[in-house]
Image (cartoon, grey):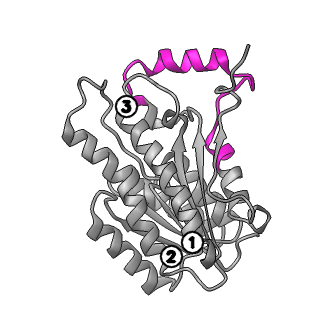
Amino acid sequence: MRFAGKVACVTGSSRGIGHRLAVRFAEEGADVVVNYVRNGEAARKTAAEIEAAGRRALVVRANMADETKIKEMFNQIKTVFGRVDIFIHGAASGRNRSTMELDTKGWDWTLSVNTRAFLIAVQQAVRLMPEEGGSVIALSSFGADYVFPYYASVGASKAALESLVRYFAVELAERKINVNAIAAGAVYTDALKHFPEMEQTIKHLKAKMPSGRMVNADDVANLALFLCSKEAEMIRGQTIRVDGGVTLPLV
């Protein structure tokens, strides 16, 4: 129960990695804010799991591309909980096109949800963090450093996200707020189904995977729980990969 009495807000927590993060933090004692934009039924199921763990859940529908909705979400959090100790930006979207086919509307949308929302949300979350500090995590991907088919908009947005993490880590250190990023490997969730030729890409990754298996959402949650703990106090502004070793330069 490392986070008993704490409040965690996880954006994009109705499904996939965000869902597991929300539930795992509840199992460690935190009350959890479940954010979603489309799938209310899945968000309510996440909330039910949190409550089954004996913690409180606040379900908030808020489009991360909309600054007003982000601010309204934190106003609700202030009203219900009065604080935020942990903020995790797991919401993500993207226009899955090659660079030559990528339109500016898709580009703007991707940057708004993946990167701009992180900037706005952290600014809001920090205002609700107590004097003893807090933790911030951004979920990135190794597409920030490597090239994948149809991933240009997402990869660029994640690279910018990781840069923001470093700036926040320095500027918020005096507030005792720790900021890091987790770059997850190809975690097999429903989100991957939206990418063209993903089955071939997954097959290629599996063949290169020293660990012998794909990364799962609990692997990501294990790291997030550690990074938000006191034991990780001196890990700041870092992007840590959870990828089963697939990005290692094998000879």
Q: Earlier in the sequence, mark 1 or mark 3?
A: 3
Q: Which mark is residue 152?
A: 3
Q: Is residue 89 above or below residue 84?
A: above
State whether residue 169 is above or below residue 182: below
CA gap, disc 2 to disc 3? 31 Å
- Image point (29%, 66%), residue name: 67
Q: Earlier in the sequence, mark 2 or mark 3?
A: 2
**Quarter-of-image position of residue 60:** bottom left
Q: Which residues are the magenta region?
A: 193-220
Q: Nearer the viewer, residue 103 or 66?
A: 103
Q: Residue at x 34, y 40 (%)?
A: 94
Q: Is residue 194 magenta?
A: yes
The structure residue drawn at horizontal position 53% and vertical position 56%, both measured from the top left corner, is 165
Cα–Cα gap, marks 2 and 1 = 9 Å
How far across and how far down the image is residue 81, in percent? 51, 83
Residue denoted by label 2: 126
